[in-house]
Amino acid sequence: MRGKELKIRNPGDAIRAGLAYVTEDRKGKGLVLGMDICLNTSLAALRAVSRYSIINLFEEIRITEQYVQSLRIKTPSVEQKVTNLSGGNQQKVVLGKWMLTQPEVLILDEPTRGIDVGAKFEIYKVMNELVAKGVCIVMISSELPEVLGMSDRVIVIHQGKLNGELHWSEATQEKTMTLATGGSEK
Amino acid sequence: MSEHILEMSNIVKEFPGVRALDDVSFQVKSGEIHALVGENGAGKSTLIKVLSGVHPNGSYTGRILVDGVDQQFQHIRDSENVGIAVIYQELALVPQMTVVENLFLGVERGKPYAIDWDTANSEAKKYLEEVNLDISPSAVVKNLGIGKQQLVEIAKAIAKKARILVLDEPTAALNEQDSANLLEILRQLRDRGVSCIYISHKLNEVIEIADSVTVLRDGKTVSTHDMHGANRLDEPRIVSLMVGRDLTERFPRVEHTPGEVVLQVRDWSVQDPDDPAKNIVDNVSFDVRQGEILGVAGLMGAGRTELMMSISVSVAQLRCVARN
Ligand SMILES: Nc1ncnc2c1ncn2[C@@H]1O[C@H](COP(=O)(O)OP(=O)(O)OP(=O)(O)O)[C@@H](O)[C@H]1O
Ligand SMILES: [Mg+2]
C-alpha cells in the first residue's frame, strides 16, 4: 500500500473479518480513490455472497422492508427507484444496504449528513443493535455531539497524525476540540 | 408593492404513488431569511423545484406570485429572469473552468462574437468581493475548497441579479468556519434587500440566522413562525413540529462491552497524491474491538477519510488476492 505496509498481527483474521466502508456517495467523493470492480463488489457483497450461495428473493424483500421501516425511509414501496427518493432518504438506503451485510467492521463516514433529527436517532439505534450482535463500528463524523454521544472511545486525528484517544466518559467537546486543533490533553 | 416578494399558494404536486406536496402555501417577505425545515421526504426540495421551474407549470396545481404577479415558469430560465436563483448542495459549477468563466457561463459579457475578458474579470472581482472571497478570477474552480466553491455559486447568483436566493442544504458538507462564513454572507445579502430561502437539517444554524421558519410535514405546511417575536421557536420546538411528537433523547447511549481486537492498525501512512514528499496519514496506530463504536474525530481535511478508506481498500485487496 502507498506509504508503509499494513501490519495486522494475524492478516488472515482481518481478511476473513470483512470490512465495509460506507460514505455519503455524493458527486466527486467516489472518485477520490479509484477502485476496480473486484474491489467494489467484494466490498459491497462481503458476507452476503460468501455465506449464502443462493439469493433468496423473498427473504431479501422481507429484510429490505424491515430496514425501510426501522430507518424511516420514506418511499411508496421497496421497488421505488432510488433516484426518485429525497436526498436524505437516498443516504438512508446507502446506510441500510451496508448495515444489511453485517460486516465485522463497519466504517461509517459522515453517516447522518443530510438526515433529519428523528431519523438520526433511528440510525443510532440500528448502530447499537449491530454492536450488540458483535459488529464493530468505526464512525467518522464532523458533528462533535454525534461522535461524543455515540462512541465508546474516540480517537482524534490532527494533520494526519493520531493526537490522542479519549474514553467516552472523559471525552468532552472542549478536550476533543483541543486535540483536533493540535493541542495536547494536559 | 406587496409585503411578500414571493407567495406560493395551494401547491399540489404528485408523483406516481406519492403526493409530494399536498396544498402547500408558503410566503416570503421581502428582505428576509426564511428557513424551510422538515423531515427527509417532507417535500422541501420538491417545493423549490416547483418554484424554479424544474417542475414546469402544468405539472403541479396552485399559484406562484412574485411581487404580486402570477408566474408560469416553463423552464429554469423563466424563474431566473424574475430574479430567482437556486443553489443546490450538488454544486453546479464546472470544475475544470476558471472562476470568471463559471460566473458568466451562459451570460458572457461583451460583443456577440468575442468575450470581453477585461470587463468580465473586473466585474468578477466586484462580485467576488461581495461574497468576501479573496481569490483570483482566473483560479480554476476544482482547486478551490468546497466552502469557496459554494461562495462562487452565490457570487454567480449575484451576477445574475438574484432577488430571491434559495439554498438547499448549503452547509451540509462545509466545515464550521466555512459554514459561519456562508451565514455571514447571507446576512449581508439580506441587509441589502435580497430575500433568502434556506433549507437545512442543522437546526442550530436555522435558529441563528432565520427571520421566519416554515415547517413542512408529509407534504403539508404545518406552520410559519416569526423568529423575532415573542413566540420564536427553540430547537426542541422545531423538532417536535417537524416530527409531530416530542423527541426528548438525541443519543440512545447503551453500555457496550468491547471484546477481542478485530482490527489492529500499526504505523499506517498514506502519501499525499499531490505531494509525494508529504503524508496525509502519518504513522497512525490503533485497535478496533468487537462490539464497540470507535469514533474518529478531527477537523475536515485532517485525513480521517483517507485513513479509513485506505485501510478498507487494502483489506479488500487482500481479500481479492486470497480469493483468486
Ligand atoms: N422525481 C420524483 N419521482 C417520484 N417521487 C419523487 C420525485 N421527487 C421527489 N419525490 C418524492 O417526493 C417526496 C418529497 O421529496 P423531497 O425531495 O421534496 O423531500 P425533502 O423534504 O427535500 O427531503 P430531504 O430532507 O431528504 O432532502 C418524497 O417522498 C420523494 O420520494
Ligand atoms: Mg431535499
Image: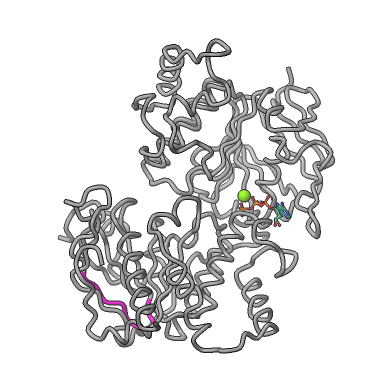
Q: Is residue B158 left or right of residue B98?
A: right
> Compared with residue B221, is residue B31 higher up or lower down, i.e. above or below?
above
Left-right relation of B299 to B128: left
Residue B146 appears in view: yes
Q: Is residue B324 above or below residue B107?
A: below
User: Percent position (x, y) of residue A117?
Assistant: 55, 59
Task: Please tell me whether residue B78 is drawn above or below residue A182 in the rendered image.
Answer: above
User: Residue sitting at 68 percent across and 32 percent down?
Assistant: B76
Report if residue B206 lies within the magenta region: no
In the rendered image, residue A141, in percent from the top left (x then y), is placed at 39, 60
Look at the image and say whether residue B287 sits in the magenta stretch.
Answer: yes
Q: Main secondary structure of the magenta part?
A: strand
Which residue is painted at 18% across and 69% down in the image?
Answer: B267
Q: How many marks?
A: 0
Tell me if I can see residue A158 in this picture. no
Please state which of residues B159 and B8 is positioned toward the viewer in this rendering: B159
Left of B261 or right of it: where is B43? right
* Residue range (magenta): B285-292
**Residue B194 in picture, x, y percent from top left:** 57, 24
Q: Picture quarter containing residue B81?
A: top right
The N terminus of chain A lies in quadrant: bottom left
Quadrant for the C terminus of chain A, please: bottom left
Q: Quadrant of residue B143?
A: top left
Q: Which residue is located at x 64 percent, y 52 percent?
A: B38
Q: Front-most of A177 and A85?
A: A85
Residue B285 lies, in percent from the top left, at 21, 70
In the image, residue A86 sits, relative to residue A127, either above or below, namely above
